[in-house]
Each structure stands twice: as structure tokens, then as C-alpha cells.
Image (tube, rainbow, N blue to C red):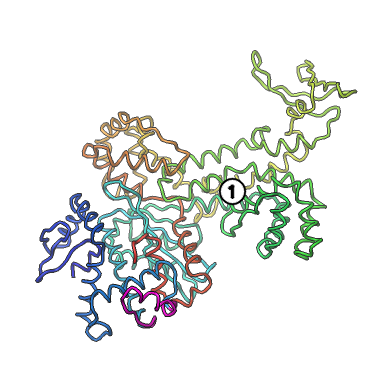
Amino acid sequence: MRVNEFPGCSLYNSVGKLFCRCCKVQLPLIKSSITHHLKTEKHKVNHEQWLAKHGEDSEIKEYLTEYFEQHKDEAYGTLDADLLLYRYRTVESCMANGIPIEKINGLRPLLERAGKSLTGSEHLKMFIPKIEERELAKLRVEHEDEFVAIIFDGTTRLGEAMNVCTRFCPADFSAIIKRLVAFKTVAKHMDGTGLFKLLSIIIAKQLQISYDKVVCGGCDSCSTNGVARRSLKTLCTGMSSFLCVSHTLHHTGEHMGLDTVEEFLTPLLMLISHSESAKSIWKQLTGTAMVAYSTIRWWSRWEVMKMLGTYFHHLSEFIDTLIERGIGDATTRQLKHVYTTKTVALQLELAAAMDMEILCTTTYKMEGDGLEILLVYDALEAIRNKGRTLGDDASSLPILAGLMRAKKKLILGTPVRDYFEAPWNAYFTGTITKLPTTNAGVWEVTFSDGNKLDYDTEPEIRQVLDVTKMEQWQPLVTKLKGGFTYLENRLTNNCDSPYHLKVQHEATKLLRAFDPSLASGLVDANYVDALRTIDPLVEHDLIDKMKAELPFYLSACSSASLVVDHGDVKEFTTKVLKWWALADKSKFPAWAVAARIVFSFTPNSAACERVFSLLKFMFGDQQWAALGDYIQAALMLKYNERAVG
């Protein structure tokens, strides 16, 4: 029984005694003793060497042999172990690659060239629950004694489905481990209570994780997920909660009232989603392929806006070509109408959208599986700072300002704003008081202090036009500020309670203590006291110990002089994990435990989104033809990057 509880760990049974094959030692049958042995560095090294030489094949054969000995009534139990292994591996490989089991019938002549006989797909399906059982057993072993974050999400895009992922940081800080632990399809919409019950079963029964080891619950802000997350907190009392920042930024973009852009985008996106000819015409005119569009991310919509703004000078010809070739009908006529009646408004709104690139780049940055939790506070603060100064001067919206300056008709009285260096070191405002009378003439500007200055060229004078005084500037700034106001309301709890982010945002500010490149200049005893707001650190009685160890931790941070690029999440994650892996954690063990807890946190639900993308890629629209256990096991094998075949 112990062998099956620890699959893939090179254990085997001999005359009722348990042995570790790769370490060549007998083990006690006590579960905790076995777990301790499997986590030793000696076993890990021996196991890697053993796997490189033998793989899992012998274990799977033993598993199948033992299974059929216990279930003698099942068919094919008398077959040779090598043949059973071949059939098992065949089914496993098909599952991991999204190949319907039924297709094995057509591939059977080819597959049997290996010298092993197969059987029909209906009979091979008997291996599906066995493959799923071994994967679930592996997951139980991997999660043993780890501090685990539970991330969950549902969708109706591909039918009613939901999935649960986990992440944790092992004691050696070798990596952030991500796992898909459940994928369920349901006949009807699952409410919050139903989702909570499912999560509690997955945690306690399927993964056999102690509730105090669940240190983080992550999801988006939909009401069903919120009910489930709050209910889960009653069981996992030391659990911190994080709403998905990427979804928040998605909604921030939606609250920017670029009405003309939306009026143009609606028919355009409908057109390009159904017409390859339209995409081909666009590429012929611009020399660039039309960007792909996804309905589930605002930044994808922004990519289309950026494309339209960049190639705005081609839009008229693009629309006219569509009309000439009879492509699009009503949608094309709508494009023509918006473009011809609102040309200026459309171009200005597209330029304003392009100046919002920080939302796109931050969404990209926060959607990974690294240590985004240590970076998200500063990333959101950068967006807030942009919102606070938005529209104050041309530098806050440089693309929009450049376009407005280029379009402005130069007349007497046109406002100007220019910067003068020492000894003034200040901006001065003025107006154009003289226009050139010849091609060689100059533009005279009279400033508020009475001084006059000549500008020799048109580009020079346009560069200092005061866009904040132009009539289109403030209305466009107001539109954009709708998004920043939404974000600010979320971060200050000036919204409905299910969408509150204030506590989360303040927590992420404190969690920067675990970034060794910042800690020495940031953390003191009061800072550690403030960490009492992080529930799992209190649950595991770490705060007082961390205060006692603080000098040793700060000394290690100072002496290491870690230099990281906080703009590169992948590099940042790699270097921070390496620092923690190599540090002498015996001097600050409580900080090491706390770091493992914190590193399991994630400010996004991107892990679940990737499962749904994987589902669509592997199964497409035919997913409902597959059995539920087949889908779950297949996605687990692929997402968890298991070696198959």
C-alpha cells in the first residue's frame, strides 16, 4: 500500500518489507518516516540518477501487476507486464497530447510495429482511471508538508467548467512549483457554496493537505469565487486572500470612456474574426499582419487600438478596398460611417489609448508564475502615480500631445508653454504674437513676464504649443481618468466589498521584506510587527521569531549585495530564489519558512487561465465527447509537465 501512496519515488515491496530501490535501503512502514527519507538530499540525487537510467517503467509494471492481482475479475490481468506497460504508455501519451483514444484504432497497425499488440480503444480506456490515480498520488506526495496556495477559476467560454491549481516553494527554494490538481465539468452553473464544498474535498481528501498548510487563496473577483474564498477561510484560518490584479487592470481599461474607438472597434473585430480576406487586405496595405485579438484580455484590445493608431493613415484606403470587394457588408458600412463622420475624434482617442501602454505592460508583467507578489505593489503604484498627474502637461500623454500639436492651426494668440534652464529652471507660458510673413520668417512668442522670443522653424514652435489649453485636451483626459478612478476606488475600498483591494495592496507593500535586494534599507522591527496582518505568518507563530532573527537576516541581505532587475520578472525570480537557496538559513530559519509561505502567494489567476487555453488547444469544441476523468487526467499530465511514453 505504501508503494502506491508514493508513486514515482522508486519504492518497492519485497515479502512485506518496504525498500528504496535507488538508495538500496529498507524503510519503516511509518508514513512520516518515508516522507522524511524522500525529502533528503541523498535520496533526491540517487533518485535522479536512477530515473535517468531506468525511468518509471519498473514502478508502473509493479503497480499494474499488483492492481490486477487484487482485481482478478478484470480483463487482461493475466497479460505480460511489459505488454501492460506498453498499453498504459500508449494511452498516457495520447492523453497528454490531446489525442482522442478512439484514434488509436486507426493508428493501431503503426503502433503494433513496435512488436507489442494493442487492443481496441474501448478496452484501452480501462487505463484512464489508473493513469489518473497515479497522477493524483504523485500530487499528494509533492504537496506533503508544503505551504500551498490554492488558485481557482471557472468559465462558460468552453462550457461550464472550473479548475483548481496550486503553487508552493519547496524548502530548497529550487523553484516555484505549479500544479493543476483538479479540472471539473459540470452540468449546471456551480454556486459559491458548491465551489467551496468542492475545494474542501480537493484539499482534505484528494490532496490530503492539512488546512493550516493552505496559506493563500487566489481567484478573480466574480461573486461565486468570492463566496467560495470567504467560506474556505473558515476552514483555512491562516489563509491570505488575493484577487487577480490582471483582471483588475482589465476592468481599469474598460472604464476608460473612449466611445468613438469602441464604436469603431465593435464592427472591426466582428469583421476580422470572420474574414481572412480583410486581414489579407490589411497586410497588403500596411506590410504588417493584423494583430491577433482575444476576447478575454483588455490588453489584447489595446494591441488592436495601437495597431489602428500606428497605421491610421491607411484606414481610409482599407475601408474603401473592403467596400470595392464587397467584404463585410453592414460591418464595413459601419466602419465607413464612423471613420468619415468622426475622423478627428477617432484618431485622437486612438492616440490617447496608445499613451496607456503602462496598463498593457503591467498586465503582461503580472501574469506570470514567478515572484510577482514581491513586485505588484510598486507596479500598481506606478500606475496610480500616472493617474494622479494625467493631463497636467504634455509629457503625461506624449503621443496624444504630439498629434494635437501637429494638427493645430497656428494663429495669433495660440497658447505656448516652454521650459527655460538656468537661471530660471522653470516653465513660462505665453502666446504667439507674430506669424511669419515669408518662408524665411519667424514665429514671435510673448511670454507672461513680457519677454519675447523668436522661433525659427515650424517644428520648433509646434513643439512648445500648450496642449493643455486646446479644446480637445481636457475632455480626453477626463475619459482616460475614468479608468484610473476605477482603480483608485478598488485600492481604497471605495467600492462594493467583494471588490476591495486595500488590505491586499497594503499586504503586498509589506511582503517586499522578502526581497533581499530591498530588505536592508526597508525592514526594521516595526516593519516586522506590521507583518502581523499577514495571516499565515501569525498562524505559524513566526513573527516574534522573525524579530529575534532580524539582525542575521539583514546582515545576510547586506553582505550579499544582490542586484536585480525589478522590471524583468523572470530574472528577478531566478536571482531571488537563488539567493534564498544559497543563504545560510540556519541563522534565520523563521524567515526562511516565512519566505516559503510568501513565495507561494500569487497576485493573479493566470495559472487557471492557462488551463482553459490548454483545454481549448487539446480538445477544441469536441471536449464534451470525452469522459470527465479523461479530460482531467490529460490536462494534469500536460500542465504538470509529466514525462510520458
In the image, farthest residue toward the bottom: 73
Question: Can residue 631 be seen in the rendering of this structure?
Answer: yes
Residue 217 in picture, x, y percent from top left: 39, 56
To which residue does mark 1 refer? 486
Region of the chain picked out in magenta, as a range: 102-122
Magenta stretch contains residue 632 = no
Q: Quadrant of residue 630?
A: bottom left
Q: Looking at the image, can residue 226 be seen?
A: no
View extreme (right): residue: 437
167 shown above or below 68? above
Question: Which residue occupies the foreground of this view, 502 or 200?
Answer: 200
Number of callouts:
1
Report x, y in % for residue 290.
65, 54
Q: Residue at x 42, y 41 (%)?
A: 571
Image location (x, y in percent) of residue 435 = 86, 24
**In the structure shown, which secondary structural element does the residue marked by tag 1 occupy?**
helix
Side (left or right) of 143 relative to 252? left
Q: Quadrant of the N terminus?
A: bottom left
Residue type, mark 1 in image: Tyr
Residue 483 drawn above or below residue 11? above
Tell me which secondary structure the magenta stretch mostly adopts.
Answer: helix
Disc 1 crowd rating (10 Å Cα; few below 14, some 14-19, many 20+) is many
**Image quarter (top left, top right, bottom left or bottom right) of the C terminus:** bottom left
Which of the two residues, 571 or 258, is positioned nearer the viewer here? 571
Is 375 positioned to the left or the right of 37 in the image?
Answer: right
- From the viewer's perspective, is residue 478 above or below residue 15? above
Find residue 82 and report its image quarter.
bottom left
**Residue lying at the far top of the rendered structure:** 423
Instruction: Confirm whether the magenta stretch covers residue 104.
Output: yes
Left or right: where 258 falls relative to 520:
right
